[in-house]
Amino acid sequence: AAQAAPPGDRDVIANLWSWNWNSVARECADHLGPAGYGGVQVSPPQDSLTRGGAVWWDVYQPAGYTLTSKFGNESQFAAMVRACHDAGVKVYADAVVNHMTGQGSTSYGGASFTKYTYPGLYSAGDFHYYAEDCGNSDNLIHGGDYAGSARNVQNCELVGLSDLETEEPYVRGAIAGYLNRLIALGVDGFRVDAAKHTSPADLGDVYGRLNGSPYIYQEVIYGPGEAVQPGQYTGIGDVLEFQYGRYLREKFHGNIADLRTFGETWSGMQPSGRSVTFVANHDTERGSGALSYKDGPVYRLATIFQLAWNYGTPQVYDGFTWSDREAGPPHTNGFVRDAVCGAGWECLHRDPAITGMVRFHNAVRGAPVANWSSPNSDVIAFSRGAGGWIAINNGTGSYTGTFPTGLPAGTYADLTGSGAVTVNGGGQATVTVPARGAVAIVTGGTTTPPAQVPVTFGV
Ligand code: AAO
């Protein structure tokens, strides 16, 4: 029986959303492993509705649990897991198990289906309905249900997606069978999609059927006063911390000095040890409440802060470049093409300042924030114990100042790439922090700049 397990020594997760399996495999070997990432999150691997490449969201409508998808086939998926493991990178799969497809009739893998009938897997009796399960006669979750009705949130249909009757032993077994097949291929854990829409009791039962100890983190979007709360799920796994990115957007568009107390005491936030944090994900970058790559250097700087701060398991997000929020990734006949950074794909995770901060994060894990200083509302600096120190400047001009670092005297290389830092015998350093940039140093054998990883990807 499996439960949530801690993610290991190197815990930064790259979320390579919508990347195909061949590209993830190469990225693990050429970039993620060498840079010190501990894991990669990949898109839903099961067969799904096909909209022929026109939209990104068809993959969130499972048509069955075979492993041909717009991202590749089962052998490509298995090869990707092996390549990532060879590079020391764990693989976390996006698990869409709350529902099945609510529209269409054909899949990427060539299956035929109708809503509520997925041959060889589920039939009409395996789904929630009005009025036995769901209190709305149209079978849909209504906006007002979030505030008042856990029953409707969990037993009606999310945007019309056939809602699995997860109380049923057959359904629980079928979902666990799918996840166990992924585990057998080497998958190390799951992002559980739409977890809010399945009760913790049902999900807990499914997790209890899993082999090994997969790491489980669940998508339960926090909303103030909602009937279903992330805290109801922290007993069975970790949760994605949605308040985290909302607050970072607010503060990086305002006063970053407020971040001094950022963490569990802030309204709606979950315990650090149960949280996976992110500045953006594929939904929030298409909404209005979070930073995204479209915010440019501010997005990058918020990610630098995320990797420096002592809270949760950090996830660094990258997807494809978009202007139409529904449009799918670059594709051929619906099947996703290899990712090419800078040509249709965003690759913040390769940015030298970000990989430097992955090293920083790994070097100071667990050490408390100390030596806080903030000379103005755009500049903050703090140490992580006596093992690392960072200054962050969200201003549009560079900032020069003298800061207490808490580090031993010496000369350190800035991991974000802006030169050397000298700490004096009193633990102070005078540094120039670039506009919308940072200076970050660590002790303990990592004072030389990170080697540049040769770019062989996409050539
Ligand atoms: C597509 C079409 C639909 C069609 C449907 C079925 O777009 O028109 O009806 O097919 O044929 C994705 C797309 C959907 C797409 C779906 C299936 O986003 O557009 O539908 O694939 O292809 C809720 C859920 C959350 C979910 C989110 C989108 O709780 O789990 O809606 N996210 C995941 C995935 C997502 C995916 C699915 C689930 C489905 O990440 O990509 O959908 O597999 C409040 C609630 C949240 C609720 C949101 C939106 O949040 O708290 O629980 O999320 O509302 O309804 C403030 C508030 C906060 C609020 C938030 C967002 O921050 O504080 O409370 O704003 O409004």
Image: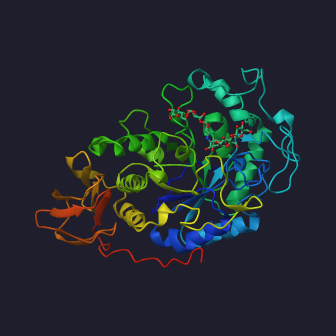
Left or right of 199? Residue 245 is: left
Q: Quadrant of the C terminus?
A: bottom right
* The quarter of the picture showing ligand 1: top right
Which residue lies at the image location 47% right of the left edge and 45% below the top edge?
Answer: 275
Q: Which residue in the rendered view is the most extreme toward the left?
A: 426
Tell me: residue 452, above or below residue 14. below
- The answer to whether 413 is drawn above or below residue 43 in the figure is below
Percent from the top left, x then y, of residue 259?
Answer: 31, 44
Tag count in the figure? 0
Q: 264 above or below 120? A: above
Q: Position of residue 453 (x, y in %)?
A: 46, 77
> In front here: 113 or 233?
113
Quarter-wise, where is residue 430 in the image? Answer: bottom left
The one of 55 and 8 positioned closer to us in this rendering: 55
Residue 82 lies left or right of residue 13; in this view the side is right
Q: Residue at position x 87%, y 45% from top?
A: 113
Q: Residue furthest front?
A: 323
Q: Is residue 296 left or right of residue 144?
A: left
Q: Is residue 109 left or right of residue 228?
A: right
Q: How is the image coloured?
A: rainbow
Q: What is the x, y in percent for residue 22?
A: 66, 69
Q: Is residue 399 visible?
A: yes
Of residues 358 and 181, the one drawn nearer to the viewer in this rendering: 358
**Image quadrant where residue 26 sits:** bottom right
Q: Is residue 85 visible?
A: no
Measured as percent of width and height from the top left, residue 313 is found at: 46, 52
Which residue is pictured at 39% across the width and 44% down the height? 248
